[in-house]
Amino acid sequence: MPCAQPRREESVGDAPDSTYRGGAVRARSAARLAWWLCAVALAMMLARLVVVVLARTTAPPAGFPSPGVQAIEVIGFLGAPILGGIIASHRPENPYGWLWCAIGLSLGMTFLAVGYGAYALVVEPGALPGGVAAAWVSGVATAIDYGLLPFVFLLFPNGRLPSDRWRWVAWTAGLVGVVLVVLFAVGPEIYDFPFVDNPVRFAGATGELVEWLFQSGVARVVWLAYIATLALSAVSMAVRFRRASGQERQQLKWLAFVSIALFGFFVVDVFVSAWQGRLRDAVVGAVLFSAMYAAIGIAVLKYRLYDIDHLISRA
C-alpha cells in the first residue's frame, strides 16, 4: 500500500485575506484623507466667521454685504466640505466625493482670503500684511469655484460621464474654467475688492494685450462659454435620466428636485424686484444649498433613496 503523501498547506488561501486587509487599509487611509480635507476647509470657512465678528462694528465698503449677510453666506456653504468628507470616506472609489472635497477646499480658500483681505484692508487697514495679496487670492479661488461647478452635474452620481460622447463637454468645461482663473488673475479689478488695483499687472506689450482683451469683450465671450458649458452639464443629467432605471433614476430625482428649486429661486430673485433683498437672499440661498447637499448625500449613499417619490408628490 503506497504511503500517504503529507498534505501541503495551500498558500493561495492567504491571497483573499491579504487582499481584504490591503483594501481595508486603503479605505481607512482614504477616509482619514477625506476628513482631513474637510477639517481644513471648515477651519478656513470658520476663520471668515471670526473676521465677520471682529468687523461687526465697521461699515463695509461699497458693494460688500453686511456682517450678518456674510455670516449667513458662509454658513450656507459649510455643507460642501462635509458632503465631500462623507461621500469620499464611505465611497472612496467614487470620484464624485473627491470632487466635493476639492469644491470645499476652494470655497474655504475663498472665504479665508476674503476675510483676511477685508480685515487687512477695511477693518484695520495696515494691521495685517499681505491684504492686497489675500484679495487677489480670493478672486482666483472664486474662479476655481466657478470652474468646478459644471462637474457637479456632469459627474453625478457615480463620478463618470453619461457616455464617451460627453468628453468634449468635460474638456471644454475644464478649459473654460482655466481661462476664467487666468482672467480673474490678470484682470484690471479684483473680484469682491473692486476698490483695490490688481497687483498682477503686466507691463509693455503684454499689458497692452491684456487690456485690449478686456476692452474688446473677450471676457464676456468667456463668460458666455462658461454659461453654455453649465447649461450642457445640466442637460447631461436629463440625458442620463432618460437612459437610467431603478436606483440611478431615483438618485437623479434627488438632485433634480433641489436643483429646480434653486433655479426657481434665482429666476425670481433676478426678475422680481419686490423679492430682492440681500438678507433674504442669503437666508433662502443657505437653506436651499443645505438642502442640495443633503439631497446629493442621500442619492450617492443611497440612504432612504425611494423617499423622493413621496417628497415630490407632497411638493
Image (tube, helix red, strand yellow):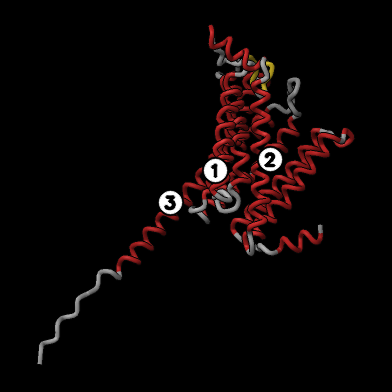
Residue 97 vertical position relative to residue 180 in the rendered view, above or below: below
Sequence-first tag of 3 and 2: 3
Q: Which of 252 and 28 is in front in this view?
A: 252
Sequence-first tag of 2 and 1: 1
Label 1, secondary structure: give it. helix
Q: Which residue appears at 69% of the width and 49% of the height?
A: 292
Q: Distance of mark 3 from mark 2, alpha carbons?
A: 36 Å
Label 3, secondary structure: give it. helix
x%, y% of residue 210?
A: 59, 15
Classify mark 2: residues with Cα within 10 Å, few (<14), some (14-19) or many (20+).
Answer: few
Q: Mark 3 points at which residue?
A: 29
On residue 167, the disc is: 1
Q: Which of 123 and 215 is in front in this view?
A: 215
Name the kind of residue labelled 1 in the image.
Answer: Arg
Q: What is the quadrant of the C terminus in the image?
A: bottom right
Label 2, secondary structure: give it. helix
Q: Can residue 97 be seen in this view?
A: no
Sequence-first tag of 3 and 1: 3
Q: Which residue appears at 89% of the width and 35% of the height?
A: 274
User: Mark 2 or mark 1, which is nearer to you?
Assistant: 1
Name the kind of residue labelled 2 in the image.
Answer: Ala
User: Mark 3 or mark 1, which is nearer to you?
Assistant: 1
Looking at this view, name the residue that lies furthest to the top.
204
Q: Which residue appears at 59% of the width and 53% of the height?
A: 157
Q: Nearer the viewer, residue 119 or 4?
A: 4
Q: What is the quadrant of the N terminus in the image?
A: bottom left
Quadrant position of residue 111: top right
x%, y% of residue 7?
A: 19, 80
Q: Can residue 133 be seen in this view?
A: yes
Classify mark 1: residues with Cα within 10 Å, few (<14), some (14-19) or many (20+).
Answer: few
On residue 231, the disc is: 2
Residue 263 shown left or right of residue 106 in the figure: right
